[in-house]
Image (cartoon, helix red, strand yellow):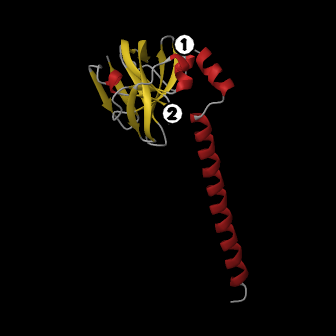
Amino acid sequence: MAGKRPRQRVMRVLSFARLAFVTGLSAFASAGAVMAFSPSPVRLAQMQAADGPVIARTDPLAGTGQAKKHADGHYWAWARVNGTWVRFLVDTGATAVALTPADAARLGFKPSDLDYQQKIVTAGGASRAASVTLASVAVGDARLDDVSALVVEKGLDTSLLGMSYLGRLSRFEATREALVLQP
């Protein structure tokens, strides 16, 4: 009986060691996944230089685009807006495409020159917005021209791909992996 106790302790220690290893490996993989969804500015430039970002992929069927579903449960898409890459959270609850002031500035709009006369309510609370028109918005091959958008003055953490784009598509379908967009 005395010989079994040391063996039981060793087995218990090995079980805890295995559990700790699997937990650590899982945490490491999760951290890598989070890093993959938040590219550094250098990595973003590399992604854009290689035929556009790797997050938005064109469907093999001509004329469609995809917004990939990420581990956070949301659909994220890289769209080419007026020739510039912008990362969007796809939001069917957003009435319009909504841009952060930083994304608007990268697209050539000078936020200080915009007329923030529209009162809006976002998930972050009340804010003001300025209307703009985007010459083109393309997720993969799902391209639309003259898309209405809002530049939200404050309270928007990321740009939203809303219904002023999605509602003009002939079809969009959510799957487990992606949101398929068809112009």
Image-based side of 178 in relation to 43, left or right: left
The residue carrying mark 2 is: 154
Residue in the foreground of this view, choosing between 120 and 172 = 120
> Where is 52 relative to 179, above or below?
above
Image-based side of 129 in relation to 50, left or right: left
> Where is 35 relative to 8, above or below?
above
Q: Distance from label 2 to label 1 (Cα)? A: 18 Å
Q: Nearer the viewer, mark 2 or mark 1?
A: 2
**Residue 108 sits in quarter:** top right
Image-based side of 68 in relation to 111, left or right: left
**Residue 8 sits in quarter:** bottom right
Residue in the foreground of this view, choosing between 113 and 26 = 113
Please indicate, yes or no, whether residue 41 appears anywhere in the rendered image.
yes
| Amino acid identity at mark 2 | Lys
Percent across and percent down for residue 52 are 55, 17
Percent across and percent down for residue 88 are 47, 28
User: Crowdedness of circle 2 by 10 Å Cα count: few (<14), some, many (20+)?
Assistant: some
As drawn, the label of residue 108 is: 1
User: Label 2's element?
Assistant: loop
Residue visible at 27% across and 23% down in the picture: 171
